Amino acid sequence: MARTAPLAALAPALLLVACASGGGTATPAPDAPPASTAPAEPEVWVAPDVAARLAKYAPTTLTADISALPDGERRALGELIAAGRVMDEIFLRQVWTGNPELRDLVAGYQGADAEAVREFFDVNFGPWDRLAEEEPWLSTFPKPPGAGFYPPDLGKEDAERWMAEHPGQADAFRGTFSVVRRVGNDEGEDDELSIVPYSQEYRPLLEQAAAHLRRAAAATGNASLRRFLELRAAAFLSDDYYDSDVAWMELDAPVEVTIGPYETYEDALFGYKAAFEAFVTVALPEESAKLAGYKAELPWLERNLPIPDEHKNLQRGSDSPIRVVDLVFAGGDAAAGVQTIAFNLPNDERVREAKGSKKVLLHNVLRAKYDQILVPIAQRTLAAEELSHLSFDAFFNEVLHHELSHGLGPGRIRVGGRETEVRLELKELYSPLEEAKADVMGVYDIYALVERGRMPRELLDTLPATYLAGLFRSARFGVHEAHGRGVVSQFNYLLEKGALSVDAEGRFRVVEERFLPAITDLLRDYLMLQARGDYAGTAAFLDRYGKATPALEAAIARLADVPVDIRPSFPLAEQLAPGE
Ligand code: ZN
């Protein structure tokens, strides 16, 4: 394998040169970063619009009411926040091994927009912009697709060849909880690969995190939390997460925490390696209890779907718990870029089979996105009289019933006498269709639960307009991508059925009497495409309805000054976290 100069060593050196010679001034700011990996003239490049990039995230305070928490739970919460901060440190290294050194240099940076540079570094966990397809905003080298999980110059083909040459280690290479590093071979060349488990690669940090978890376990009076924390602390040092994942499913405590290596999106090379993260939260038991009531309605909701009985999925289990919590600290992967509003874990299929999965909704994050993003979007896209028909309650319930809808409707199906799954038949169109189905079924189910007397009728005053504003919120992430086409298809279908109208100023409104009938028709169409496993039909549907119209493009263009996401600060983290 031929090797180029390791990028990891390069960038910090470049910054050093610039800082030493120019007093930290950002050197000539071209309009776009030159796409070089090894420039002959070392220079640091800071995107001239770093402040504008940072402004896409609205600063937001996230906290929770902990007045009812006993002392021991508060101490546990503080230790968990401290453990969450260790996840920041590990994730920083997982994004790029050169990051800790780069961060030190950024800390001393004194050029233009120095404060924005430091904050934007923290938002992105490194020199690449997560809202701009990871383009470099600091210095000029591209992000290695394998992030900090593999040698930065390791290509996919090199890796495949290595696995073919080392069949005994191929499974380890694909492991979720390990990194791949280079080691010297007999000729002294840096050519051999070695698989290093997380427990070894990040040992000192994982020991710190485990110590915080054990102190939290000693402080809490809740047995299910204590059990999870003790098992998770052990898993940090053994790389065996199964037992602690099971204990997480059984966790039911005033202080809820999700901490460890979970999602694999950061590994854009293979998607094998899990990134460390933490959601430290305070439970909202009353909200969770309300949801438990809806869960009991799931079999009824399945029977109530607007499709023939033969296509209904009446055998599905619905054991998965749902929790509503307030976020008091996000660490690592959970803190990078766009903030999560709801998640469904664990990903380990063995745990999902044995125990199902748990959905967690982050109530205060949803509230912040409603206030900071959804309302301003509505103000720029909806007709004036619609603005009094928005509510957080409708937004929260639409998100909740979207999540629940993923568990309803066709899953395993028969096509031409063959047993199969919707997912397998619809291939790359599955996910845009399934997401659009969940949006529309969420609305349909809320209407149904109101009729059934399980939800308050007032909700229907604000549901349609809040749903419509939500479509614009989703559409701005890209109307030309697969997911965007699912969103656009809802919009165009409802417009064609006369359930939406647009006025001369390009403002949208809901035509109330046509709204529920059109939602019902649209849901039936989505569900039948799924029930038949109809790939060609789905493609034709998305072709017909999934293209952005000039009116929609114009509406999205008016959103340029609305923040894309929030940038949280966590006052409880300052208040509660213990010193080292
Ligand atoms: Zn979804």
Image: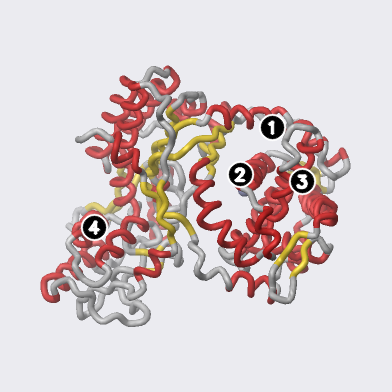
> Where, by quadrant of the figure, is residue 522 drawn?
bottom right
Residue ID at (50%, 49%): 368
Q: How far separated are the C-alphas under marks 1 and 3?
A: 14 Å
Which dot, 2 or 4, sits closer to the camera?
2
Categorize mark 1 by other alpha carbons within 10 Å: few (<14), some (14-19), many (20+).
some
Q: How far separated are the C-alphas under marks 2 and 4?
A: 37 Å
Where residue 295 sits in the image (x, y, percent)?
68, 31
Above or below: residue 131 compared with residue 192? below
Element marked by disc 2: helix
Of callouts 4 and 3, which one flags the residue occurring earlier in the amino acid sequence?
Answer: 4
Residue 103: numbered disc: 4
Residue 396: numbered disc: 2
Q: Is mark 3 within 8 Å of ligand 1?
A: no
Residue pointed to by mark 3: 444
Of callouts 2 and 3, which one flags the residue occurring earlier in the amino acid sequence?
Answer: 2
Residue ID at (36%, 48%): 569
Residue pointed to by mark 1: 294
Categorize mark 3 by other alpha carbons within 10 Å: few (<14), some (14-19), many (20+).
many
Where residue 52 sits in the image (x, y, percent)?
39, 70
